[in-house]
Amino acid sequence: MKSKGSAYINTIGCQMNVYDSEKLALILNSNGYRQTSDMDQADIVVCNTCSIRHKAEEKAFSFLGRFARIKKKNPHLVIVMAGCVAQQEGKKAFKRVPHLDIVLGTQAFSRFGRHIAAVKAGRQKIVDIEDSQKIYETMPDTSEFDFDRLKENKISRFVTIMQGCENFCTYCVVPYVRGKERSRKPESIIKEISLLAESGIKEINLLGQNVNSYGQQEGDTSFAQLLFQVSKIQGIQRIRFATSHPKDLSMELIHAIKDLDKVCNHLHLPVQSGSDKILGKMNRGYSRQTYIKRILDLRKQCPGIGISTDIIVGFPSETRDDFSDTMDLLREIKFDSIFAFAYSDRSSAPASKFSHQVEEKEKADRLNNLLELQEHYTKEKNLSLIGKTLEILVEGKSAKKHNGFEKNRKNLEQMTGRSECNKIVHFPSEHATVGDLIKIKIKNAYPHSLWGYPAGVLN
Ligand code: SAM
Ligand code: SF4
């Protein structure tokens, strides 16, 4: 197709948004617009937004706000707000960003090409926040254009396997901006991953808000069975997935992690709080004890498994004692890593109406204390790996040079990759190339990475 111009996409938020932006790029490409990394030269600017926390939402408005002046100079520039903030705000988005052309909700992506053509033909201010049954089935699979992009040194890709969420955790906007939980058909997922494997992708990260309930709304394939099917695809060497909900973590899934070689020995299992009172108010559907039991089951079946989690501090009515329960949970479980957030009030989520909101300063203090405690365990976990040999999927050249790196040895590159447990590992190598699986003996551990030598080369 003849090029009609170029498009710049700014992605804010989670891995699912990264996947959605890749789909937006494919749609734009099939409509004649190639992707550019130069926003000043673009004919179309898209901001794929996130509304999970106030800060992310503000980031979207501030990015789009910058184009007011540019749009005045160049009225043909098409400006698009896509994703969660678009879905949440609808036509209200024009109040804060009057120069917007299209507000494209989370379920409207398949109609994006049509909306671009309408704006180019003179239509103004399009809002599409309609519900759609099967958003991912109607988005394009990978294409030749995508194949070219994939060659740009990528070995790992996200593939979204389900949309929406119906868990209604009281702090969370996802059920309101991403709609009902619906699973993609296994055939559609397998076809997409097979195409990615053909193009050289080695690692697949399956995405959903609650992958453990995959297939429960329709069909007869469970998530563990889907993992089995994906693991049979030739060329795919590693499978990761996120996010698992503790209330739906089945023994079937634990056995899939244990038995399927390609499924990485790592699980991201968000706990959110260590206090039963707060877990109840969050509507999480499990107790602290149930969560601990799941972790014990996991560690028994899958020794050495890496476990990470999400935690929210300062949820309404969280007392210092409740927060201490969370700190104690960290001491008890010793996670490999955590993602911690100060509670952010979202007006569409029920918790915004809860009494006893925690002061911002108190939230910030709790967040710092939590991160400080976790740093100790992350370091401890990393130190325990010294002397072990880990299998690493090589991702590329390392940006940071290690102190002990032998500068004088010719032909040695410092490379980087990840272990199955999701640890970043740097190592020197003469021959390793992107996509190789290579055994590395760990020599040093740092707060956020490990360092070692190819096993069998040096001891
Ligand atoms: N579906 C996943 C689950 O159940 O854990 C997580 C989805 S959410 C996109 C990612 C993380 O953002 C959550 O695990 C939670 O810790 C955090 N989060 C969600 N809403 C939040 C809020 N209102 N304030 C602070 N953090 C929030
Ligand atoms: Fe949000 Fe809860 Fe659904 Fe996760 S499970 S997306 S936190 S409502």
Image (spheres, rainbow, N blue to C red):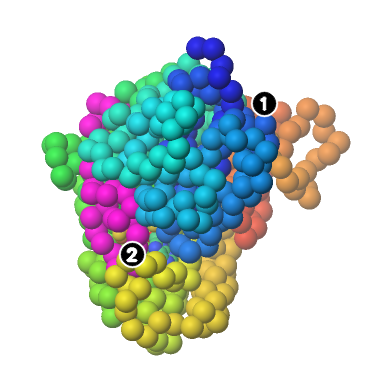
Q: Which residues are magenta?
A: 164-190
User: Residue 49 at what x, y percent from top left?
Assistant: 47, 49
The x, y position of residue 141, in whole percent, is 38, 24
Instruction: Give the number of marks.
Output: 2
At label 2, counting other C-alpha atoms closer than 10 Å, the crowd grade (few under 14, some 14-19, many 20 or more) is some
CA–CA distance in space, label 1 to label 2: 53 Å
Q: Looking at this view, is 285 or 99 the one in front?
A: 99
Front residue (pair 310, 416): 310
Determine which residue is flagged by label 1: 431
The C terminus, quarter of image: top right
Let me know if residue 192 is in the magenta part: no
- Residue 348, numbered label: 2
Tell me, yes or no, whether the two marked residues, 1 and 2, touch with CB atoms within 8 Å: no
The vertical placement of 240 against 343, above or below, is above
Q: Which mark is residue 142?
A: none
Which sits earlier in the primary sequence, circle 1 or circle 2?
A: 2
**Left or right, residue 78 beside residue 26:** right
Q: Is residue 256 visible?
A: no
Judge left or right: residue 5 versus residue 227: right
Q: Residues within 10 Å of mark 1 (few under 14, many from 20)?
A: few
- Where disc 2 sits, the SS reads loop
Mark 1 belongs to which amino acid? Answer: His
